Image (cartoon, rainbow, N blue to C red):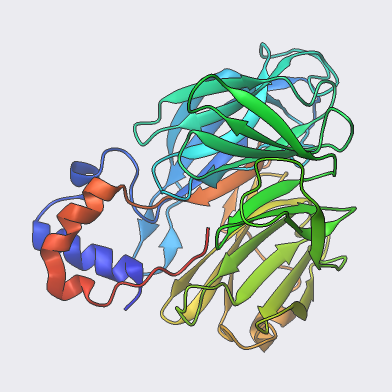
Amino acid sequence: MNRFACLGCALLFLGGSAQAIQAAFVNGDLVILTTSDNTSTSADAITLNDYPYNPLTGTFGTTPTSHVLTGLTLPGLNDHDGMLRVTTNGNDLVFGGYQAAVGTPTVIASSATRAIGLVDSNWNLTTTPITGYSGVALRSVVSTDGQHFWTGGDQGTDGGQYYINASGPATQTQITANDARANQIVDGQLWGFSSSNAGTEIGSGLPTSAAAATIAMNSPFVKSDAVFLDLNHDGTSDTAYSTDGKNLLGKWNFDGTNWNLTGQWTGTKADINNINSLEAFVFNGKIELLAATQQGQLFQFTDANGISPNFDPAFLANTAPTPFLSMPSESFRGMAITVPEPASVALLALAIPCLLGFRRWRSR
């Protein structure tokens, strides 16, 4: 039984809606961080668009609930920034942005303060200013609990990757000076992805001081973002999907020691290009892969091969996909699938017979 079917059964048991029992985050919804412009380097307003998940069809609605954020901006023309992540405890969404007024020209090159954005389950934004990335892009943020953050951005003496501890008086420590388009926490390990270093493991676990970067995925098919899955439910990710930030998708399998590129997909640039972000979930035993682009397009691919090495034939043949969601004047940056809060899980546990089939399906 997949987790979404389980959630639906539990809600029927409780006789209520997800909104009624777990604040504003709805388990399984897709949240896309969006700017209204995709051509200008000036600062633009940020909106979080929440698309409802349909557990009966394994698809998302096309009419979102929109939450306009004030206090942070991003350039309209993306620099692989605006990545959106769920904290590993599932309580909040995090991303990086600029404390600059809408319309500030060439905001990345400006001296505007960079800041971490934290959005709670009621869509309230709080910011943590940081001192790094002056004149360069802050691209992604990951966090365990909304207090401890790892950031990634343009390389350089003032860029790279930092650890920020905001649990007391805020401290900031540079971990590496390496370029990072996207950071991830995978099975308790910090990863960074970039065009120069591909997929790298940063230090051991979640480093809080200077650490070495070890290349774990090296291919033109991994330069911008990746999503990891634990398909055999043993607590360790075994399958991953990656993108080059343009029109390439890669599939990877972990053999217990190394990550191996086992599938390669090339889309037609006229139909799919400038992929910013990936997400994935399991529905009816098949992997549903989501790809969001700078041109405001969202694609959903089905890989029926699951843990098997390559993409399935139908996936490989679909090189000119049709987006199921298109907003061409806007830019889709990062995206994340929300998860329930601890209090919600406690309430859902009332439906024990249904929840016996629940399994954590994704590594964060």
The spot of residue 101 in percent (x, y) is 66, 11
Outermost residue toward the front in this view = 209
- Residue at 81 percent of width and 52 percent of height: 212
Q: Is residue 213 left or right of residue 47?
A: right
Nearer to us in this view, 39 or 307: 307
The spot of residue 38 in percent (x, y) is 74, 34
**Quarter of the figure with residue 256:** bottom right
**Quarter of the figure with residue 258:** bottom right
Q: Is residue 108 above or below residue 138?
A: above
- Residue at 34 percent of width and 53 percent of height: 27
Q: Is residue 195 above or below residue 280?
A: above
Q: Is residue 186 above or below residue 239?
A: above
Quarter of the image that includes the N terminus: bottom left
Is residue 292 visible in the rendered structure shown here? no
Total marks drawn? 0
The spot of residue 78 in percent (x, y) is 76, 36
Q: Is residue 138 left or right of residue 122?
A: right
Is residue 27 visible in the rendered structure shown here? yes
The spot of residue 218 in percent (x, y) is 85, 67
Nearer to us in this view, 190 or 303: 190
- Residue at 45 percent of width and 33 percent of height: 66
Q: Is residue 239 left or right of residue 213?
A: left
**Quarter of the figure with residue 59:** bottom left
